[in-house]
């Protein structure tokens, strides 16, 4: 079968249809963090610091559970491609059982973070406020895992609109909840940082209710729902999700851990270095959002093609999705290299920070274009249910290569804070280069093993369901 430009255009449209609701959902989630920061900052600098500390502690727990649940989207995508409708129905109750189990683990862990805060030797008031914030958020973590189970079920089908709708409505609800509980308005107690935590927890519980209601009333999704949600746990199915998802979750968990350690290194170089690093990290984070949105959409399309056994369609989905991911990376890199000073000016007017940040943003531009290739390859490997290899590569690339190199270039041989901070980002680039080469090599090997398939069949897979 000869692949035409029309085929690529059609595949790009299909990837885009899955990716754009994800971008909206992630913008809403990012907006929630911005609202929390602004509203808490206007209340008290101590409460803002307490929330920042607490957020950076519970976020890795959330990412661990998110990664585990993403395995559900991989399984559902392949079953959808293979037209195994009953298998798709059967996996939903089991993913919900796993979500309940994970929520029952991470919630109490988050609640009992007092000893960790004591180790940080914080100011007692800040420590107390941070613990109160995390203890409130702890009550919402079980809900957010259930939300991810439902979101990943629809993602595997290629339907992301429920995720977007629930995220946007949750973002909107978080604003009055913050106002009410942080400042003590409308008869509510004035709780400060703890109030922000309770607002977050309530929003977390709204999310599964919203996406669940959307799913129940969607005629497109209904054929893929089980007749009964309340069924006994199937430990074989739950084990399958864990085997696929745990490496993804640990990848997310350890990846953010690397950036946490790197930030602590940079903090020893002074306030200007830390502020410049925070700007660079935020710039990367903003660009990373559309990268993973396209990567996730591509993985869903590849999963559909794998399930259907259409090898030419697999290659088409990989080529198109990779091209789109690289396009996002290249465009972002060109923008960052063209107007770095303008971008930095939006964050700060202090010349000392600006000089360091200018070097870092240019390094971030290089990091992004390399990372776009790594994201594409890693997400495709996940679509093939190959999650352990990318995890092992990430462990060595970041923890075995980038961190020691960061210490050497950033703290040992650097002559000033600017060189030290830039050296740490060079170390991160070295790690992402190593990871990109290995996961790319792994993906190339898998694609080379695919036989040339006959003409495409099951045309209904081509575009997927629309909700």
Image (cartoon, rainbow, N blue to C red):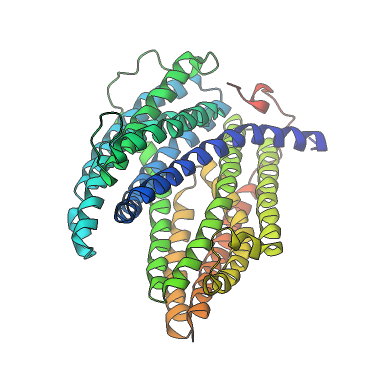
* Residue 261, quarter of the rendered image: bottom left
Horizontal and vertical percent for residue 40? 36, 47
Q: Nearer the viewer, residue 177 or 303?
A: 177
In the image, is residue 443 above or below residue 427? above
In the image, is residue 67 above or below residue 439? above
Horizontal and vertical percent for residue 157? 54, 27
In the image, what residue occupies the spot 56% across and 36% down? Answer: 24
Q: Is residue 431 left or right of residue 366?
A: left
The quadrant of the picture occupied by the N terminus is top right
Horizontal and vertical percent for residue 431? 52, 67
Q: Is residue 385 left or right of residue 454?
A: left
In the image, is residue 421 above or below residue 435? below
The quadrant of the picture occupied by the C terminus is top right
In the image, is residue 182 above or below residue 120? above
- Asked if residue 116 shows in the view, the reply is no
Q: Nearer the viewer, residue 41 or 448?
A: 41
């Amino acid at each position: 079968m000869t692949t035409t430009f029309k085929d690529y255009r059609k595949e790009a449209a299909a990837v885009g249809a899955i990716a754009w609701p994800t971008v909206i959902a992630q913008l809403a989630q990012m907006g929630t963090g911005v609202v929390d920061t602004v509203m808490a900052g206007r209340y008290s600098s101590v409460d803002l610091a307490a929330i920042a500390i607490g957020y950076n502690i519970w976020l890795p727990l959330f990412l661990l559970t998110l990664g585990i649940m993403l395995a559900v989207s991989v399984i559902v995508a392949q079953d959808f491609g293979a037209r195994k409708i009953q298998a798709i129905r059967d996996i939903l109750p089991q993913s919900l059982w796993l979500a309940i189990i994970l929520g029952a683990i991470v919630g109490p862990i988050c609640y009992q973070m007092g000893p960790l805060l004591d180790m940080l030797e914080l100011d007692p008031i800040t420590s107390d406020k941070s613990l109160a914030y995390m203890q409130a958020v702890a009550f919402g973590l079980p809900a957010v895992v259930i939300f991810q189970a439902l979101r990943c079920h629809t993602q595997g089908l290629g339907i992301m609109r429920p995720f977007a709708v629930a995220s946007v409505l949750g973002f909107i609800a978080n604003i009055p909840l913050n106002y009410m509980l942080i400042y003590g308005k409308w008869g509510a107690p004035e709780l400060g940082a703890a109030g922000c935590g309770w607002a977050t927890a309530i929003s977390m519980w709204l999310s599964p209710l919203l996406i669940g209601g959307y799913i129940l009333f969607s005629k497109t999704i209904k054929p893929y729902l089980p007749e009964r949600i309340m069924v006994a746990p199937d430990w074989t199915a739950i084990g399958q999700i864990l085997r696929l998802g745990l490496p993804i979750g640990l990848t997310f968990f350890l990846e953010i851990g690397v950036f946490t350690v790197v930030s602590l290194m940079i903090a020893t170089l002074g306030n200007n270095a830390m502020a410049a690093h925070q700007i660079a990290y935020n710039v990367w984070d903003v660009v990373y959002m559309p990268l993973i949105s396209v990567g996730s959409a591509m993985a869903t399309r590849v999963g559909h093609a794998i399930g259907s056994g259409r090898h030419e369609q697999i290659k088409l989905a990989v080529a198109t999705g990779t091209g789109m991911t690289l396009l996002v990376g290249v465009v972002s890199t060109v923008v960052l290299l063209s107007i770095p000073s303008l971008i930095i000016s939006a964050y700060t007017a202090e010349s000392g920070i600006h000089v360091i940040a200018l070097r870092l943003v240019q390094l971030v531009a290089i990091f992004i274009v390399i990372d776009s290739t790594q994201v594409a390859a890693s997400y495709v490997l996940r679509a093939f249910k190959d999650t352990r290899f990318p995890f092992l590569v990430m462990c060595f690339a970041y923890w075995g290569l980038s961190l020691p190199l960061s210490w050497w270039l950033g703290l040992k041989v650097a002559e000033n804070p600017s060189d030290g901070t830039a050296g740490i980002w060079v170390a991160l680039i070295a790690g992402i280069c190593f990871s990109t080469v290995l996961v790319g090599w792994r993906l190339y090997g898998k694609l080379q093993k695919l036989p040339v398939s006959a003409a495409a069949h099951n045309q209904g897979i081509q575009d997927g369901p629309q909700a």
